[in-house]
Amino acid sequence: MIFTAFDLGVLRAWPGEATLWQTVVEPLNRMEIGASYRWRGDNLLRNALQLPALQLPSLWIILLLILAYIVIIGPVNFLVLRRLKRVELAWLSTPLLGLLFMIGTYGASFLMRGTQAQLVQVALVQSNEDAPRSKTTAFVGLFSPQRRSYVLGFAPRALLSAGQFDGFGNDAVTFRSSDSTSEIRDVLVDVSALRTFIVEQPDGAALQISSELSRQGRLVTGTVSNASGVTLSDTLLVSGNAAVRLGDFAPGSSLEARLNLNEGNFPNDFTNALVSTDGIINRQTVLNNLFDFDRFSFGGPLFLGEQGMPDPNGVYLIGWRDQPLVDGQLDTGTATQEGTTMYVIRLDI
């Protein structure tokens, strides 16, 4: 959205319009991730989320539970009653044992799901090396251990969208914005279910990353320095479909980089994952969903059957931090928040 103090139409007949905008506005290369995921046929958070409460019990645990139920309610029950010489009480002990197993199963499930709602997210932060501001696209999920409706609040300038393929496609939600908050109302979540939303914030603070890189043929070499107060893990230097692992990136430190543009290992190394697959968010799955085939272009998805960063001439630093970036508030006031933030910083070369 653009606001001006005059009618932009008056510039249309002026020959110097292009020069004016080139002087006033500096375009930044950013991927329109949120806009694309409003209609894409997948859900980034659901694909990468590894929330224990959403995982089904092991098949072996279920089989063991069934076997224990059969043994106890059958032979064990009969042998105990016969030893007590009260076999006629089987009509009472059998339903009681069934009830106990039902209560125990429900209690175990209740302990696995917990009692509080959970907010989980994967946030993608895009910025340029010299830019003071960044753009954040967060995929936020609301997990509820019970069926109920919520009011979910974010920062006042946030752009909110409903996630795709939630199983609640016909259930309308109400978005409201004010000077103090942006809210999503009437968020109905079923028992042990997850609803996802896209939260876009255009004016976050960018990480202070500097670089001294040079390109010689198909080789990029140099150093990257972290002048921010944030420690990045699983750091990658990426250009096109080539990447090199730099490791952890502590504040005040510098990393030597040597990137061979012929690698063809991004986002898939095929032999080893480029980034961590553990934790609540599978980082490698995030990379695969964003930069594998049918990748993003600057301005929208580009279906060319290619993979890698959509800017083949740019060099990017990708780093991760296991901390949610976008703050969400529930009307219940009780919700744990977990997540991962991925920083994508275009470097000067």
Image: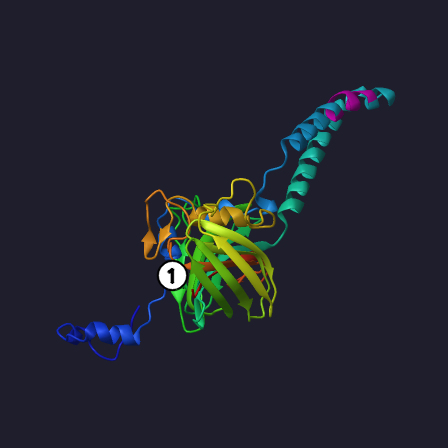
Relative to 139, does residue 349 appear above or below in the rendering? below
Extreme residue toward the bottom, this view: 5
Assess whether residue 77 is covered by the magenta stretch. Answer: yes
Picture quarter with the N terminus: bottom left
| Circle 1: residue type | Arg
Asked if residue 328 can be seen in this view, the reply is: no
Q: Which residue is drawn at 69% across and 30% down?
A: 65
Assess whether residue 289 is covered by the magenta stretch. Answer: no
Picture quarter with the C terminus: bottom left
Relative to 151, does residue 203 appear above or below in the rendering? below
Q: Which residue is drawn at 43% across and 58% down?
A: 216
Q: Which residue position holds label 1?
A: 30
**Image coordinates for residue 347, horizontal then vertical, percent:** 45, 64
Which of the 4 image quadrants contains residue 323?
bottom right
Which is more toward the observer, 50 or 115? 50
Magenta stretch: give its range.
72-79
Asked if residue 316 can be seen in this view, the reply is: yes
**Crowd around label 1: few <14 · some 14–19 · many ≥20 (10 Å):** many
